[in-house]
Image: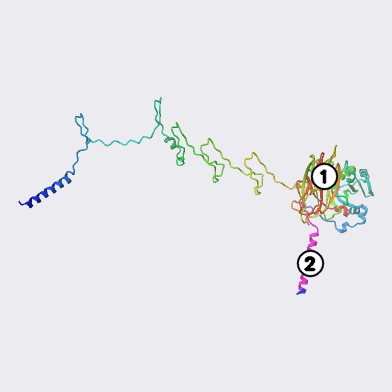
Amino acid sequence: MKAEDIIILLVVVIIGAAVWCLVLKQWPCQPAREPIVEDADIVWEPDSGLSPMPIKPKALPRPLVEYPNAASTRSLIESMELEREAMALPRPLIEYSNSAITLALEGPQTSPITLPRPLVEYPDSVLAVALEELKITPTTLPRPLVEYADSAIAFALRPPLQGLNSSAAPTELRPLVENADAGWIRSLSPPLGLFEGGE
Amino acid sequence: MRFGFLIALIAFLVVLALGSGGLIGDKLDGDGGLVLRQPSLMALAATTEQERKGVNFLQQEAGIAAYVKVDQKINLEQVRDAFKTIETVSDEYIIGEVALPKLPEKAHPHVYVNKDGWIVAYYSKDEPASKIMQWVGYKGGKITTTTLEDAIHKIWDASRAPLPFPQEPVKYYDFEYPNANRIMLIAEINDEDDSTDSFFLKIPRGLRLHEASWTLYHSGGWGDIRGSLKVNDKEINSIGAGFRYGALSTTQLTVEFRHKVKVWNWRGFTGAAVVLIYQAGG
């Protein structure tokens, strides 16, 4: 055997050893990860067929209570579910309350829903009433704006002579009188029967 | 060309003249169907019949007048005693002066009464029409009577006629201004010490005002009592107590101006009234 043959044989052996380690033995070979137990009574085998532990819900942070006579924790979800229609609106954050309720503030039915309204939050009660115009005043004439008055009344100012024994037509040309205490207008007509000499 | 223009001008003037005549002509009254018809010249002309009845005297002497026609004969002898003075008397009529209680003599109206049932109370044409304001018994509020109506009722009561007084209201006429068809009376009273009360009066353009007159009254009392009447801050008259009457000129009541009529009172009761005789509707 020549020297060259010996070298070729060594190379083949080395290559074969490398392939064996890499493919069949997963080289580089590492030691087992199991803890080394010595002198134990019972050793749990990882291949005993047990399923993985279920993942427990992550616990909410809770107040720390020490030495109480009694303690109870309730979920606010139940009351919240009763008011699902209000879920979309931002709500006040309430913590550690024994109970809670959320009521939606309905728009007053007597007021126009299209008008802008004041935003009211957390009142005990609320009432909105539409301010109606005074029916006794002319609606077409401009009027003074009155706010927060206890009561109000408006009268139409008429010429003082109208209706005071006036026999003149209201539309005819006549002197204009304002603020007089009393007066009247009467027709002037001749005593024709007297002129004509008859009855 | 010129001839055609001349014809057109003449036609225009003729149409204008006819239109003016229409405006001046009789007008319908707007007070619910009452037609005011001016007495024609024939009716106003003195006739023998009118002289016999004394009507021509009314046309010549009377100014503002109130009248009523009752549907029965009037016994002239019975009403004679109701007159303070008799001015003219005949078998057909009586003309005299009637005294009204508490009124001054200058405010006593004349009354014409004939046996056919005509009673006409009037002031002469040189007296202001404001004398019709009856201050006696008036304390404010609605004006329900005048001195002329009171005089008519006084004659009527003296006649002791069996039938009641006519239901229809007493009518008015101004013999001095036959074209006038309206009379307006405006009253203002003031019973607060040292205070002024006022009203405004405006004569619109187009209204023909024939006469404007005023009256001032003060109830009187103890102490220095006064009342005054001002038009546009110009004093028309002042009074201690009693009755005053006068006329307002056209310069004092210009058209289209808001005249302020003020009544001042010091103790007691001051009243002022303005009476306008005018032609409405043309």
**What span is colored magenta in the figure?**
B4-33
What's the residue at 65%, 46% (across, down)?
A144
What's the residue at 39%, 30% (across, down)?
A64
Judging from the image, mark 1 belongs to the subunit labelled B
Whether the residues at callouts 1 and 2 have beta carbons within 8 Å, the answer is: no
**Spot occupied by residue A180 in the image (x, y as percentages of width and height):** 77, 46
Disc on the earlier residue, 1 or 2: 2
For residue A192, side relative to residue A4 (left or right) = right
**Spot occupied by residue B272 in the image (x, y as percentages of width and height):** 82, 45
The residue identified by callout 2 is B13
The amino acid type found where label 2 is placed reads Leu
Q: Main secondary structure of the magenta part?
A: helix
What's the residue at 83%, 53% (across, down)?
B249
Residue B31 in magenta stretch: yes
Q: Which disc number belongs to residue B16?
A: none
The residue positioned farthest toward the bottom in the image shown: B1
Q: CA distance from mark 1 to mark 2?
A: 52 Å
Local packing at callout 2 (Cα closer than 10 Å; few below 14, some 14-19, many 20+) is few
Judging from the image, mark 2 belongs to the subunit labelled B
| Viewer-side label of 1, 2 | 1
Residues A121 and B142: in front is A121
Q: Is residue A80 visible?
A: yes
The residue identified by callout 1 is B228
The amino acid type found where label 1 is placed reads Ser
The residue positioned farthest toward the front in the image shown: A3
